């Protein structure tokens, strides 16, 4: 493949890249102006301005086409012996040079338009610079694979970290398995997202509703039927059931769209992950780039025997969403394989599990009961008082708070072996974070005035991908942990990324 394509001299993308640029620019314009277009089209006077409107529309489409062509013509790239070089820009031109040792990942991506015209977008992620990330929008599949293979070979030459393990495909997720994953997701989160989107949409089109006099009619309808709805338990039950059903459907579509065709493979010590329906992504992950491995589950997932796994990679500046790569529906055997690939020592069998100081549980109880007390005071105000029914809710609310606090305390722990730190947390769900000691950048101890009385500290562990917090560690234990982690990170000879 290297001989078939010459990347040593400047070359352009596939000519189909003009279409990719065209629809990208058009999408950005529509995304910003759709509500304005919606309101204009709804006006009764649009008929008299129809000619001007269509002239403006044609002008915008021509502008988008010209800009797309100019972006395509001015985008050139090549690969030298030391770096990847890119020239781009229409009026303000830029030259970007990325040394091979700074290349973090080379990923493939395909949105719906790119799938239709059969091209691939190549994303080159870097670490160590604040905003360097290259995106080549339109290459043929064969040319994209050749470029990826060349860049991977160049980065391996500099990093000297090519592993010999080659497991091939270790897991391929079917539609039925995606259904299991979606059923075990956090549906309350999906419901909140739906409510947020609905409210956001209402705020944007509120003025439009006023022009149609719908808002006044809706208010009258609510005033007429409010008394009936308040005492109609069947309607409330249907609303709750319907909302929950919609949340489940939302979870399914979200999981299906993001993780359709999920395939996990290990080739030459490199993890390859392909997934996505409308936007297909092909990501590669190397051992040295992963800063934290996060494994999460919940009671239903445990019954189904599946886990969600997230890889947190090194970022610089502001945290980027793309720096966290998530896979779902992973079985126990595959989780063990992934841990073995990423870390050299994941054996915590004979290691002690350290729990937080009892002050941690006392603090959570205090916060929970303070919340209940404030609610009871509010509902004791005469014009808000709901009668004895509200106080009966305390019979459910107080045991619930006790249960949740106990769950959170029981699931909070950390373990330490010779090379790694393992932190567990959660309530209904459980999250495990793994980090190699040599990848820790610094450790800090923080103490509030209330913690000082009990001689406890919160331990914050900083990696290149973010912070890990271990709450309410006893003073002597916190100092020992602080000294050990700093010693391991300062004396390590391995490259942290």
Image (spheres, rainbow, N blue to C red):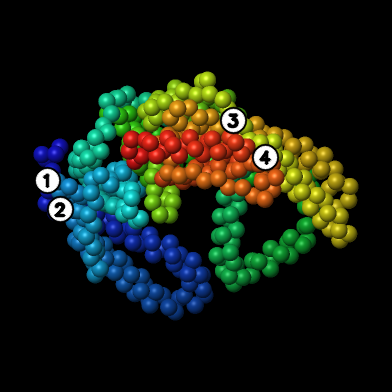
Q: Which residue is mark 3?
A: 354
Q: Is residue 367 visible?
A: yes
Quadrant containing the N terminus is top left
SS under mark 3: loop
Q: CA distance from mark 4 to mark 1?
A: 62 Å
Of residues 488 and 224, the one nearer the viewer is 488
Considering only vertical position in the picture, is 67 above or below 107? Answer: below
Q: Earlier in the sequence, mark 3 or mark 4?
A: 3
Q: Is residue 340 placed above or below 390 in the rendered structure?
A: above
Q: Residue at x 29, y 55 (%)?
A: 20
Kindly state the secondary structure of the residue where label 1 is placed: loop
How far, Cα to Cα, is label 3 from label 2?
57 Å
Where on the picture, by quarter, is residue 469? top right
Q: Nearer the viewer, residue 316 or 329?
A: 316
Looking at the image, is 438 positioned above or below residue 334? below
The residue where tag 1 is placed is 6
| Residue for point 38% across, 77% down | 52
Please name which of the two marks, 3 or 1, marks the residue nearer to the observer.
3
Q: Residues within 10 Å of mark 3 (few under 14, many from 20)?
A: some
Contact (CB < 8 A) between labels 2 and 1? yes
Above or below, comparing residue 375 to residue 160 in the picture:
below
In primary-sequence order, the first of circles 2 and 1 is 1
Q: Position of residue 406 (x, y in %)?
A: 70, 34
Graded by Cα atoms within 10 Å as few (under 14), some (14 to 19) or many (20 or more), the crowding at tag 4 reads some
SS class, disc 2: loop
Give me the C-alpha separation between circle 3 and circle 1: 57 Å
Disc assigned to residue 11? 2
């Amino acid at each position: 493949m290297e001989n078939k394509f010459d990347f040593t001299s400047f070359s352009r993308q596939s000519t189909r890249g003009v279409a990719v640029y065209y629809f990208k620019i058009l999408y950005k314009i529509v995304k910003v102006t759709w509500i304005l277009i919606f309101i204009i089209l709804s006006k009764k006077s649009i008929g008299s301005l129809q000619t001007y409107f269509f002239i403006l529309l044609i002008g915008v489409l021509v502008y988008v086409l010209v800009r797309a062509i100019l972006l395509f013509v001015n985008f050139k790239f090549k690969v030298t012996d030391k770096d990847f070089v890119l020239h781009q820009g229409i009026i303000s031109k830029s030259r970007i040079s990325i040394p091979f040792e700074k290349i973090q990942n080379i990923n493939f991506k395909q949105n719906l338009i790119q799938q239709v015209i059969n091209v691939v977008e190549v994303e080159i992620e870097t670490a160590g610079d604040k905003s360097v990330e290259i995106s080549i929008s339109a290459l043929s599949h064969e040319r994209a694979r050749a470029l990826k293979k060349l860049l991977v070979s160049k980065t391996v030459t500099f990093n000297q970290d090519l592993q010999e393990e080659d497991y091939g495909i270790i897991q391929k997720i079917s539609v039925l398995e995606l259904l299991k994953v979606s059923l075990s997701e956090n549906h309350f989160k999906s419901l909140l997202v739906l409510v947020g989107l609905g409210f956001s949409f209402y705020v944007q089109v509120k003025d439009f509703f006023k022009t149609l006099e719908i808002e006044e009619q809706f208010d009258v309808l609510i005033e007429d039927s409010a008394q009936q709805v308040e005492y109609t338990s069947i309607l409330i039950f249907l609303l709750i059931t319907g909302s929950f059903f919609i949340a489940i459907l939302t979870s399914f579509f979200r999981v299906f769209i993001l993780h359709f065709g999920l395939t996990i493979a290990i080739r030459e010590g490199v993890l390859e992950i392909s997934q996505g329906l409308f936007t297909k992504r092909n990501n590669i992950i190397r051992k040295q780039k992963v800063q934290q491995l996060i494994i999460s589950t919940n009671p239903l997932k445990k019954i189904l025997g599946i886990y969600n796994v997230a890889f947190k990679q090194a970022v610089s500046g502001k945290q980027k969403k793309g720096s966290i790569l998530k896979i779902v529906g992973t079985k126990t055997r595959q989780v063990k394989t992934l841990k073995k690939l990423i870390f050299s020592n994941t054996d915590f069998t004979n290691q002690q599990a350290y729990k937080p100081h009892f002050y941690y549980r006392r603090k959570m109880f205090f916060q929970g009961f303070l919340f209940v007390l404030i609610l009871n005071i509010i509902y004791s105000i005469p014009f808000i008082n709901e009668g004895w029914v509200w106080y009966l809710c305390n019979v459910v609310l107080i045991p619930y708070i006790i249960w949740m606090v106990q769950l959170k305390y029981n699931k909070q722990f950390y373990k330490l072996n010779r090379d790694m730190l393992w932190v567990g947390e959660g309530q209904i769900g459980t999250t495990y974070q793994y980090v190699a000691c040599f990848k820790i950048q610094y450790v800090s101890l923080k103490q509030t005035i209330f913690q000082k009385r009990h001689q406890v500290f919160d331990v914050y562990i900083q990696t290149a991908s973010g912070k890990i917090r271990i709450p309410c560690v006893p003073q002597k234990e916190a100092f020992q942990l602080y000294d050990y982690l700093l010693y391991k990170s300062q004396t390590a000879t391995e490259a942290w990324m």
